[in-house]
Amino acid sequence: MYVFYSGHGNSAWAGLMVYEWVAELSTIAHERLSMVIEACFSGDLVDDLSVLPNAVIVASTRPGVNGPTSSHSSAFGRDFIDEAMKQGLADAPFNWQGIPIGNGDGQVSLQEASRWT
């Protein structure tokens, strides 16, 4: 299962949102869960969401950090979603700095995507 959230976030309501997401996602059968959260303070959610079985959580910010939320205006949306994932650039053998990131098999794995960032 793949979940993408892009919207507003703040540290005050993060706990309630996590509780609701965990409750809802726990009722849906899934072999694996990949969740991308593009919201302010999304890094605050990672530890709490990690209680979900077979889950990989990608956040657009570190814990305690505010950040942009529009995929059309943020570096996260433009670079990660558009370039790394849609264009498959995270699967390339090397990134723009010459650092090894991908294996060139035509599919972007979560490991490759994390190396892109």
Image (tube, helix red, strand yellow):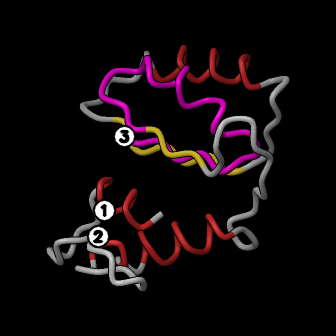
Q: Which residue is mark 1?
A: 112
Secondary structure at numbered mark 2: loop
Image vertical order of residue 115 relative to residue 102, above or below: above
Q: Which mark is residue 101?
A: 2
57 or 102: nearer the viewer: 102
**Residue 73 location, quadrant:** bottom right
Q: Position of residue 45 (x, y in %)?
A: 62, 29
* 3D distance between C-alphas at marks 3 and 2: 24 Å
Q: Residue at x 24, y 71 (%)?
A: 102
Q: Position of residue 92 (x, y in %)?
A: 27, 80
Q: Residue at x 72, y 68 (%)?
A: 74
In primary-sequence order, the first of circles 3 and 2 is: 3
In primary-sequence order, the first of circles 3 and 1 is: 3
Q: Position of residue 79 (x, y in %)?
A: 56, 73
Q: In front of the other: label 3 or label 2?
A: 2
In primary-sequence order, the first of circles 1 and 2 is: 2
**Residue 52 location, quadrant:** top left
CB atoms of marks 1 and 2 within 8 Å:
yes
CB atoms of marks 3 and 2 within 8 Å:
no
In the image, what residue type sits under mark 1?
Answer: Glu
Image vertical order of residue 107 relative to residue 9, above or below: below
Q: Which mark is residue 1?
A: 3
| Magenta-drawn stretch contains 42 | yes
The magenta region covers 34-56
Q: Residue at x 75, y 48 (%)?
A: 7
Which image quarter is the N terminus in? top left
Secondary structure at numbered mark 3: loop
With 45 as the anchor, is 72 left or right in this view?
right
48 or 87: nearer the viewer: 48
In the image, what residue type sits under mark 3?
Answer: Met
Secondary structure at numbered mark 1: helix
In the image, what residue type sits under mark 2?
Answer: Ile
